């Protein structure tokens, strides 16, 4: 200590000696009213007079003396402060010498409170004191609390408690209403100061007094914040108009108007391009998508969607030429301090589609194979009316209720005409077929569910009970006309039938889950689940007789009822910390099935006992690296079409027969994943592998007769196995000039079925290798080049000589360029190469080139004009190759090809929000 | 001799000197850090909004500042559950971070765990231009004066310090006021640090030591550069304000 003291002393002296242009400021501080006049520990600060920046400070010693060395001569603001005394402040000038000055402080006890009144826009109106907010300067982004601090007579403490002229403010209103609850800080800390027009202070009479009109003298000091009109509400939206050659159009208009609590949006769209339906971002901002749930658990965030019920009609996967129309609106409202929230949506959509496709199929049989070539033209038109509502009700801090109601009415029409030829392994014609099918279907659906969630005072002890009801009804009428010509018999079979179908189903699903904490990080979860499922399907086929369809064909007619009751109870243990979480447990379930064949008056009953094991582990190796394992088992019920004991001859070459003896399938899945990302070096690894085995899996038992007619039935098989993996590494190369990535995506499967009474195992393998290069300079350009090579291999035991073995390759180039500020150029080039095989001999190699140029015009840059050119080389084809056990198919279909389109898009908004680009 | 007495007075504990108000030269301050996440996140980002609905609007953390006349260390205080930690990790938040300030040498050693890398940032104290204001507020039982600090040219911070604690220490990189900082408000980033309790016991020397295996030694300039490069890669440097925000987050968030 002594040494350090001396050192400091020396340094101080040295500095004092070397710097000539310095002043010293010293003196004594005292309080004359005390017996002991020296004021110790007072802080003496010097701030530059010109910018008031703190320059130097010291403390008075036990004698009340202070000294500041090495001061630049000049003008300073002096502040002397001490907790027991009123602050002393003065403007002083220090000369290039020893400046000595003594100060006498005034004890706080003697200090009279002074009120500063600024001559400012403050008005009194009746009993209300009003401040014009814009007259009080606050920093950019300041909240109301910052504003209140600037108002004369206002004090706001660290907790946000407000006092006006010494009286506590207990209520803060916004435009006369409570702002999301009773806590004044909610309003003062969450509202922007600049959104406030006026601050009003008044005494609010009690609710009782307001109700009775009798002033009971109970008043609350209240602040009312009047908002500027432009911040109260607003709207945003867009209008998109696009038209091109080849009957291509894509027009839409969307608007969202909002207030702080209410949101109403409306939208309409019509399109004949591949962009039908709403985009994900549009769905969120206009469509009121309420079915995506964000679940945040143990640090992982998953966005799940049960499939937006509003969609249904509105998906297009590149097959055919679509025409789409849609209109809808969405309403969201919050009230009762946000404790009640309702979302209601309605949507109408219609999709017409024209398709032309050719399918080449190969059926691998023992010692031989069969081929069919089919050409099909079809037209479909479907429309739907859908509504849904979601009600969130917070009953109190521990109880909440969520009610969902969905309803829909759908209708569809399909017409198709197809011609096909079947060939045997010697490529000799076996049959020729003409099939005409027209179908009209109407369906109604209603579902409702209520979820009650209860928390208890003990953390992590919860109870949730969910009850749901689903009701479906559909009716269909179809006409089937088919001419099947057998080459060997030189015989023609004609089918001319009217088919009527009626389908009804209802499901009741109730589930209760209770969690109980057993230690700081662990809970035990118990659940009980009852599912009651009733389905009934009537299929009636009438042959044409004397020009009338009234001869019931029993082979293709049936009425079937299926009921299943599932009771499940389960227990699970879950442990979670920030580093890892794991859980294990299982359910045990009893399923009771009852089938009634109402035509044959046969009743069948089955009972199953099932185990549903579950185990998972997620380990966070570091912030950006984690490892997880997952295992579970579950059952699958067959569909009613798979069970109903009736033949379906819609395609007389492929007759499906229901199997009432089907058992439920049991799946076991094991997945493992490992991810690592290093943000600084940009190296990443993503990997995933899954194994899936199924007992009593649904497979087919098919027989193909010499005439080329295939009959098949769903049967249970054991030993099916699927494996799928994904490995991806990414890293920068050439000193972070480029990002490079490699991916490997293998999948294997072993699937069993029966072919002409022979048990068959098909082993398939797909190996996909990807390479990619990307250069991205944000807001300037983004260029990427990638290549994917896929090898497909498949072999069926029933015919070991026939192997399916081919490569496909896809090379693509993407560029997005923001050349000049208001210009944007995008282009995509893709080359698809598909190896021919012995059976699939047509040329499917295509080069597809898309390009788009956009320019932002108008002063606000909110109008975008662009030209879109799709498939400039006009080479696009619809192509799909499938390996499904011993059935291999290649399908070519019509799809959207070359078109050019002019596009104008106008984004508009007023108020705080605007549409986000997604 | 007078000079000697003056300097001696500064170093001699003054806590017992005043009969009316006790003065502190060493101790430990407990802080509550609150970040209004719902205001920091993009109000139009429905994903972030969902997080706010799930986690609450605030990230609340507890830190402590141990100080004596030589140095101070700001680090994690009592246990807390910070559900926002994954989100904040992008700004350099980590429970192991600390800020060690040496007043004699005017240096600051920051330990930061950024993107799974351990950085030891050794640099001189942050230059802050303080302006003392004519406003007081009571924090943790201490009467505090308001000061507004400016650093990095455009960043402003509000501090509340108490004359009653004879130390220039403060949370994070904020220090250099004529008393210990008990309150910090960083309004631009909806970030506040307020003392909840001041313990008078002198902290043991071991409080100021650290043991980190193989840290990456760096300076504030370098880490700022690295961060800026990252932001540029993510395309977030177009708006100068966003750029500042990143720097502020990386440097200031513990």
Image (cartoon, coloured by chain):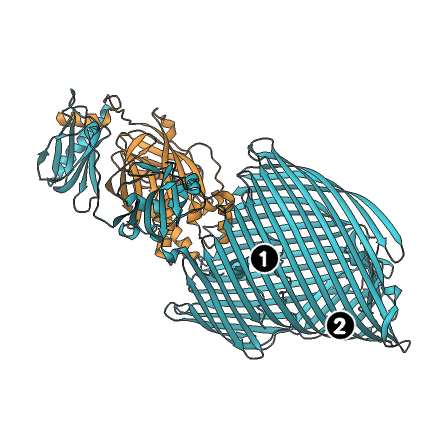
Question: Which element carries disc 2, helix, strand or loop?
Answer: strand
Q: Report whether residue B216 is seen.
A: no
Picture disc at residue B95: none
Disc 1 and disc 2 in contact, CB within 8 angstroms: no
Q: Which chain carries label 2?
A: A
Front-most of residues A791 and A328: A328
Q: Position of residue B57 (x, y in %)?
A: 45, 44
Question: Which element carries disc 1, helix, strand or loop?
Answer: strand
Give the quadrant of residue A152.
Answer: top left
Q: Where is residue A658 in the image (x, y as percent from the top left)?
A: 83, 59
Colour cyan belongs to chain: A
Front-most of residues A916 and A310: A310
| Residue B226, placed above or below residue B6 | below
Give the quadrant of residue A824.
Answer: bottom left
Front-most of residues A291 and A857: A291
Q: Mark 1 points at which residue?
A: A743
The answer to whether A164 appears left or right of A243 in the picture is: left
Q: Where is residue A851 in the image (x, y as percent from the top left)?
A: 51, 73
Q: In what quadrant of the picture does the N terminus of chain A appear?
A: top left
Q: Mark 2 points at which residue?
A: A438
Residue that extends furthest to the right in the rendered view of this protein:
A489
For disc 2, the neighbor class at 10 Å (few under 14, some 14 to 19, many from 20) is some
The answer to whether A416 appears left or right of B110 in the picture is: right
Colour orange belongs to chain: B
Distance from disc 1 to disc 2, alpha carbons, whole Å, reads: 46 Å
Give the quadrant of residue A415.
Answer: bottom right
For disc 1, the neighbor class at 10 Å (few under 14, some 14 to 19, many from 20) is some
| Residue A310, placed above or below residue A849 | above
Q: Position of residue A556 (x, y in %)?
A: 85, 65
Q: Report whether residue A241 is seen.
A: yes
Residue that extends furthest to the top in the rendered view of this protein:
A35
């Amino acid at each position: 200590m002594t040494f350090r003291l001396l050192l400091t002393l020396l340094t101080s002296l040295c500095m004092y000696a070397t710097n000539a242009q310095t002043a010293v400021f010293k003196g004594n501080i005292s309080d004359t009213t005390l017996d002991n006049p020296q004021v110790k520990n007072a802080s003496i600060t010097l701030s530059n007079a010109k910018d008031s920046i703190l320059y130097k400070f010291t403390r008075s010693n036990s004698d009340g003396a202070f000294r500041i060395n090495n001061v630049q001569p000049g003008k300073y603001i002096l502040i002397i402060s001490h907790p027991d005394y009123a602050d002393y402040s003065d403007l002083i000038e220090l000369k290039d010498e020893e400046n000595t000055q003594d100060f006498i402080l005034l004890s706080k006890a003697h200090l009279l409170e002074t009120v500063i009144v600024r001559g400012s826009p403050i008005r009194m109106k009746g009993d209300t004191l009003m401040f014009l907010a814009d007259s009080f300067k606050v920093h950019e982004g300041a909240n109301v609390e910052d504003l209140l601090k600037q108002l004369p007579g206002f004090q706001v403490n660290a907790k946000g408690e407000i006092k006006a002229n010494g009286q506590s403010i207990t209520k803060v209103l916004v435009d006369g209403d409570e702002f999301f609850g009773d806590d004044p800080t909610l309003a003062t800390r969450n509202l922007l100061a600049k959104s406030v027009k006026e601050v009003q202070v008044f005494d609010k009479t009690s609710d009782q007094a307001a109700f009775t009109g009798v002033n009971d003298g109970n008043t609350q000091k209240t602040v009312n914040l009047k908002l500027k009109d432009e911040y109260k509400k607003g709207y945003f939206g867009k209008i998109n108009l696009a038209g091109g050659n080849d009957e291509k159009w894509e027009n839409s208009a969307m608007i969202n108007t909002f207030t702080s609590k209410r949101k109403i949006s409306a939208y309409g769209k019509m399109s004949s391009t591949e962009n039908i339906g709403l985009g994900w971002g549009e769905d969120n901002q206009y469509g009121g998508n309420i079915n995506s749930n964000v679940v945040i658990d143990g640090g992982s965030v998953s966005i799940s969607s049960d499939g937006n019920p509003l969609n249904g009609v509105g998906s297009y996967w590149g097959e055919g030429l679509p025409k789409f129309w849609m209109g809808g609106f969405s309403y969201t409202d919050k009230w009762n301090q946000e404790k009640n929230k309702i979302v209601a949506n309605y949507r109408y959509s219609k999709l017409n589609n024209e398709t032309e496709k050719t399918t080449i199929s190969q059926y691998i049989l023992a010692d031989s194979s069969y081929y069919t070539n089919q050409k099909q033209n079809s037209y479909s038109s479907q429309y739907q009316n859908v509504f849904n509502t979601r009600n969130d009700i917070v009953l109190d801090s521990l109880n909440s209720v969520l009610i969902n109601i969905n309803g829909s009415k759908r209708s569809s029409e399909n017409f198709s005409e197809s011609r096909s030829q079947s060939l045997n392994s010697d490529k000799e014609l076996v049959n020729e077929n003409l099939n005409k099918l027209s179908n009209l279907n109407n369906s109604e659906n209603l579902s409702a569910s209520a979820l009650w969630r209860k928390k208890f005072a003990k953390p992590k002890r919860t109870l949730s009970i969910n009850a749901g009801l689903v009701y479906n009804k559909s009716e269909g009428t179809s006409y089937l006309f088919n001419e099947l010509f057998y080459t060997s018999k030189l015989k023609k079979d004609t089918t001319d039938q009217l088919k009527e179908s009626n389908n009804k189903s209802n499901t009741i699903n109730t589930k209760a889950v209770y969690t109980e904490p057993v230690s700081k990080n662990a809970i035990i979860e118990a659940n009980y689940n009852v599912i009651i499922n009733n389905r009934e399907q009537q299929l009636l086929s009438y042959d044409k007789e004397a020009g009338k369809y009234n001869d019931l064909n029993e082979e293709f007619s049936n009425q079937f009822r299926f009921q299943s009751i599932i009771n499940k109870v389960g227990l699970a243990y879950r442990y979670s910390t920030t580093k890892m979480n794991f859980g294990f447990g299982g359910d045990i379930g009893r399923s009771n099935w009852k089938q009634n064949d109402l035509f044959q008056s046969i009743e069948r009953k089955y009972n199953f006992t099932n185990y549903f094991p579950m185990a998972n582990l997620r380990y966070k190796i570091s912030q950006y690296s984690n490892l997880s394992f997952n295992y579970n088992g579950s059952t699958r019920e067959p569909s009613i079409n798979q069970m109903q004991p009736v033949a379906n001859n819609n395609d007389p070459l492929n007759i499906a027969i229901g199997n009432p003896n089907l058992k439920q399938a049991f799946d076991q899945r094991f997945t493992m994943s490992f991810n690592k990302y290093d943000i600084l070096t940009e190296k990443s690894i993503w990997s995933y592998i899954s194994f899936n085995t199924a007992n009593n899996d649904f497979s087919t038992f098919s027989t193909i007769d010499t005439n080329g007619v295939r009959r098949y039935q769903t049967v249970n098989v054991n030993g099916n196995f699927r494996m799928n993996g994904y490995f991806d590494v990414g890293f920068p190369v050439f000193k972070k000039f480029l990002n490079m990535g490699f991916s490997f995506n293998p999948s294997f499967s072993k699937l069993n079925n029966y072919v002409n009474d022979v048990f068959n195992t098909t082993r398939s393998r797909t190996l996909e290798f990807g390479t990619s290069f990307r250069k991205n300079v944000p807001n300037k350009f983004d260029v990427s080049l990638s290549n994917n090579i896929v090898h497909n291999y498949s072999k069926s035991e029933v015919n070991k000589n026939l192997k399916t073995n081919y490569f496909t390759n896809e090379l693509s180039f993407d560029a997005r360029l923001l050349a000049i500020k208001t210009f944007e150029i995008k282009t995509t080039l893709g080359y698809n190469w598909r190896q021919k095989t012995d059976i699939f001999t047509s040329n499917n190699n295509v080069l597809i080139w898309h390009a788009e140029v956009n320019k932002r015009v108008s002063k606000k840059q909110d109008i975008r004009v662009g030209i879109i050119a799709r498939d400039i080389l006009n080479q696009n084809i619809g192509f799909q190759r499938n390996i499904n056990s011993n059935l291999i198919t290649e399908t070519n279909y019509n799809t959207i090809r070359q078109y050019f389109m002019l596009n104008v898009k106008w984004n508009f908004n007023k108020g705080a929000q605007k549409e986000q680009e997604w | 001799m007078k000079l000697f007495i003056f300097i001696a007075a500064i170093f001699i504990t003054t806590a017992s000197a005043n009969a009316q108000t006790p003065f502190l030269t060493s101790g430990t301050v407990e802080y509550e850090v609150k970040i209004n996440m719902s205001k920091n996140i993009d109000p139009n980002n429905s994903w972030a909004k969902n997080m706010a609905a799930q986690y609450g609007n605030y990230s609340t953390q507890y830190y402590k500042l141990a100080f004596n006349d030589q140095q101070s260390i700001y680090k994690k205080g009592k246990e807390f559950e910070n559900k926002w930690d994954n989100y904040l990790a992008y700004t350099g938040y980590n429970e192991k971070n600390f800020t060690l300030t040496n007043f004699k040498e005017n240096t600051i050693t920051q330990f930061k765990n950024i993107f799974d890398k351990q950085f030891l940032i050794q640099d001189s104290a942050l230059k802050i231009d303080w302006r003392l204001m004519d406003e007081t507020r009571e924090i943790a039982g201490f009467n505090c004066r308001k000061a507004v600090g400016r650093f990095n040219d455009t960043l402003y911070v509000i501090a509340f310090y108490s004359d009653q604690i004879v130390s220039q220490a403060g949370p994070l990189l904020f220090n250099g006021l004529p008393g210990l900082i008990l309150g910090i408000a960083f309004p631009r980033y909806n970030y506040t640090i307020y003392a909840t309790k001041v313990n008078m016991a002198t902290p043991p020397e071991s409080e100021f030591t650290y043991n980190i295996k193989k840290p990456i030694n760096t300076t504030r300039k370098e880490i700022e550069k690295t961060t800026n490069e990252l932001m540029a890669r993510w395309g977030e440097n177009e708006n100068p304000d966003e750029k500042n925000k990143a720097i502020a987050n990386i440097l200031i968030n513990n």
